[in-house]
Image: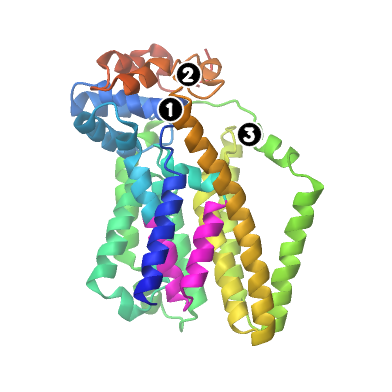
């Protein structure tokens, strides 16, 4: 890849990060729960609140992101850029890992740019670059694992790659429990894709057993101090959030999906190439999404689209890999025609979303800073995020009185925080 291509891809990555930076967006309920930790007087007080709240309103969290936010807010005051910085850094890691993975599959700058644009065309995924929650760190770490396990033994043995996987593993394992499942599944899937001769020694070496053990050890240790100590007893409709999304799908959506599938099949047919490996990766990540949906069903908790963003990101990259692999094997004349069609579709999808994102950023900038947060936040749990957003406008340190929120008995262990 040329130096010019690297510069252009870097600039495109910066554009994507800027679009989803949430610059100027006020706090909403879930971010509010992180922000008010900045009002605690000491690390000890903040950690005590993490331990009590991760069995309740912050259920399922390790508390690592929260404690990072505490340190950032102590350093920079009531600053939303600082609050969301771990997710923004993770967004950059996601894009870097996407590029690294596709290079490992012998695809160039065009495929990487296509992947960036396809990811950017999915606001329900990329939104988390600008939200102070551990979902983007988890997704980025999973993508980093995919890039690592898709590398050759010689590449993985280099010092930069060793530092890369160990650093991203620590980041993912401490951030979110889902990563503890993604890491071995990705390693196993990549082992199957690599088609290496079977032996236990070869398998153990490929999956990097010390890495796997350390990931579980870190995740379980921090979990034992936080979310593994208990969770609320939920009685919620698991389909409440997903049902409107399914209901919003119309005939044109289904026609478009079928048309894209047919286009891909035509590409594969003309290229006469084998795309079983990208399909295997796609299905494996789809299976992970199903697994997390089932876990929500078992707990009588909402099935939330954000649970699937790591799978969604990797499935997107698997599609780009499959298309790129098929196009490379297609006769030159047909290749140009098909590549033009894919380019038009990708640019259309990206442009529509990009215009909407720019409009949102402009609205937040030009219409002031609405302190009320998202509509419905206060109705949901009788939580008023207004004082925290006013704190951001006024600047200075996070107000200590905001941290008193975690003193409420209502957020004791085993209680559903959604119940008044």
Callout in the foreground (3, 1): 1
**Which residue bears the numbered disc 1?**
26
How would you rate the neighbour count of disc 1 (Cα within 10 Å): few for under 14, some for 14-19, many for 20 or more?
many
Foreground pick, 403 / 112: 112
How would you rate the neighbour count of disc 3 (Cα within 10 Å): few for under 14, some for 14-19, many for 20 or more?
few
Secondary structure state at the residue bearing disc 1: loop
Secondary structure state at the residue bearing disc 3: loop
Tell me which residue sits at (71%, 82%) in the image. Answer: 270
Q: Quadrant of residue 302?
A: top right
Q: Residue furthest right?
A: 251
Mark positioned earlier in the residue sequence (2 or 1): 1
**Which residue bears the numbered disc 2?**
372
Tell me which residue sits at (39%, 48%) in the image. Answer: 137
Q: Mark 2 to mark 1: distance in Å?
A: 8 Å
How would you rate the neighbour count of disc 2 (Cα within 10 Å): few for under 14, some for 14-19, many for 20 or more?
many
Q: Is 285 on the left or on the right of 176, as rendered?
A: right
Q: Can see residue 183?
A: no
Q: Can see residue 365?
A: yes
Foreground pick, 364 / 116: 364
Mark positioned earlier in the residue sequence (3 or 2): 3
Q: Mark 3 to mark 2: distance in Å?
A: 22 Å
Q: Is 1 on the left or on the right of 232, as rendered?
A: left
Residue 374 spot, x, y in % from top left: 52, 25
Verify CB contact (< 8 Å) between mark 2 and mark 1. yes
Q: Which residues are magenta?
A: 93-121
Residue 238 spot, x, y in % from top left: 63, 34
**Which residue bears the numbered disc 3?**
241
Tell me which residue sits at (32%, 46%) in the image. Answer: 174
Callout in the foreground (3, 2): 2
387, above or below 157, in the image: above
């Amino acid at each position: 890849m040329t130096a010019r291509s690297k510069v252009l891809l870097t600039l495109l990555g910066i554009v994507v990060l800027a679009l989803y930076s949430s610059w100027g967006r006020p706090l909403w309920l879930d971010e509010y729960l992180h922000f008010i930790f900045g009002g605690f007087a000491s690390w000890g007080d903040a950690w005590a609140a993490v331990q009590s709240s991760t069995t309740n309103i912050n259920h399922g969290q390790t508390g690592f992101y929260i404690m990072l936010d505490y340190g950032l807010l102590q350093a920079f005051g009531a600053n939303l850029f600082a609050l969301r910085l771990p997710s923004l850094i993770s967004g950059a890691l996601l894009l870097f890992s996407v590029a690294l993975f596709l290079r490992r599959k012998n695809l160039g700058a065009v495929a990487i740019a296509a992947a960036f644009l396809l990811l950017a065309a999915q606001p329900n995924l990329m939104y988390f670059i600008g939200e102070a929650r551990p979902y983007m760190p988890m997704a980025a770490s999973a993508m980093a694992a995919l890039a690592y396990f898709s590398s050759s033994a010689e590449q993985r043995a280099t010092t930069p790659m060793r530092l890369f996987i160990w650093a991203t593993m620590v980041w993912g394992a401490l951030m979110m429990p889902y990563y503890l499942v993604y890491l071995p599944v990705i390693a196993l899937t990549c082992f199957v894709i690599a088609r290496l001769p079977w032996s236990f020694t070869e398998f153990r070496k490929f999956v990097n057993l010390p890495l796997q053990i350390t990931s579980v050890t870190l995740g379980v240790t921090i979990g034992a101090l936080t979310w593994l100590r208990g969770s609320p007893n939920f009685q919620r409709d698991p389909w409440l959030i997903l049902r409107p999304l399914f209901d919003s799908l119309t005939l044109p959506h289904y026609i478009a999906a079928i048309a894209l599938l047919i286009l891909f099949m035509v590409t594969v047919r003309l290229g006469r190439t084998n795309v079983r490996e990208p399909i295997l990766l796609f299905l494996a990540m789809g299976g992970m999404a199903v697994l997390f949906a089932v876990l929500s069903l078992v707990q009588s908790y909402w099935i939330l689209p954000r649970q699937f963003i790591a799978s969604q990101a990797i499935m997107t990259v698997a599609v780009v890999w499959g298309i790129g692999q098929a196009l490379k094997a297609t006769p030159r004349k047909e290749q140009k025609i098909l590549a033009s069609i894919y380019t038009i579709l990708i640019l259309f999808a990206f442009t529509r979303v990009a215009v909407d994102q720019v409009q949102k950023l402009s609205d937040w900038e030009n219409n002031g800073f609405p302190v009320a947060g998202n509509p419905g936040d206060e109705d949901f749990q009788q939580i008023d995020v207004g004082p925290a957003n006013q704190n951001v406008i006024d600047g200075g340190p996070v107000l200590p009185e905001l941290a008193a929120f975690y003193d409420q008995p209502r957020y004791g262990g085993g209680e559903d925080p959604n119940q008044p």
